[in-house]
């Protein structure tokens, strides 16, 4: 573990926590505009006035469209499910709960995300 501010500051993935005197993984959301723009691992989102991880910040907003079969076959049995439409919706629901649509890790729950942003 890194135990001094100089060594910590020299590691691009770390930042020094002066309050706790510990080296921590870099969190772009703690940076102000200038610090964010100087850090190659962070990206300043002008519209939102926030600093985010570069890998998420440069992505455009994303629309997802699903085209679902509406024919009579959707009323038939699909595997163990008695109705194809319900089976398909279960698959979509499960898929949607695992895809990464924001800067949060896929394991972040809605409650966790709201607690971190102050939105409830």
Image (cartoon, rainbow, N blue to C red):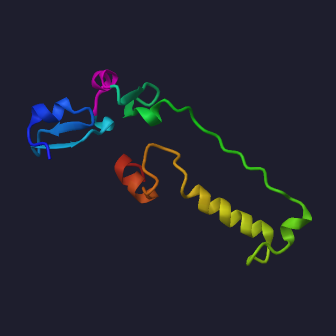
Given residues 117 and 90, the one toward you in this image is 90
Given residues 40 and 102, the one toward you in this image is 40
Residue at 43% x, 24% y is 46
Residue 119 image offset from top left, x and y in percent: 41, 49
Asked where in the image residue 33 lies, by quadrant, the reply is: top left
Residue 38 shown in magenta: yes
Residue 117 image offset from top left, x and y in percent: 38, 46
Outermost residue toward the right in this view: 72
Residue 89 image offset from top left, x and y in percent: 70, 63
SS assignment for the magenta stretch, majority: helix
Q: Is residue 19 above or below residue 12?
A: below
Residue at 46% x, 57% y is 110
Residue 32 image offset from top left, x and y in percent: 29, 28
Left or right of 111 on screen, residue 4: left
State how many labels appear: 0
Residue at 74% x, 76% y is 81
Asked where in the image residue 93 lies, by quadrant, the reply is: bottom right
Left or right of 80 on screen, residue 53: left
Left or right of 3 on screen, residue 33: right
Given residues 70 and 25, the one toward you in this image is 25
Residue 53 shown in magenta: no
Q: Is residue 84 above or below residue 42?
A: below
Q: Which residues are magenta?
A: 31-39
């Amino acid at each position: 573990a890194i135990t001094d501010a100089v060594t910590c500051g020299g590691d691009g993935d770390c930042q020094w926590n002066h309050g706790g005197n510990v080296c921590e993984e870099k969190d772009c959301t703690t940076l102000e505009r200038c610090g964010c723009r100087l850090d190659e691992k962070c990206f300043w989102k002008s519209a939102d006035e926030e600093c985010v991880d570069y890998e998420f910040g440069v992505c455009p907003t994303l629309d997802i469209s699903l085209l679902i079969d509406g024919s009579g076959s959707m009323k038939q049995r699909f595997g163990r499910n008695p109705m194809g439409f319900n089976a398909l919706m279960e698959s979509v629901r499960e898929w949607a709960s695992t895809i990464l649509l924001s800067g949060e890790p896929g394991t972040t729950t809605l409650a966790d995300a709201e607690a971190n942003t102050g939105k409830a």
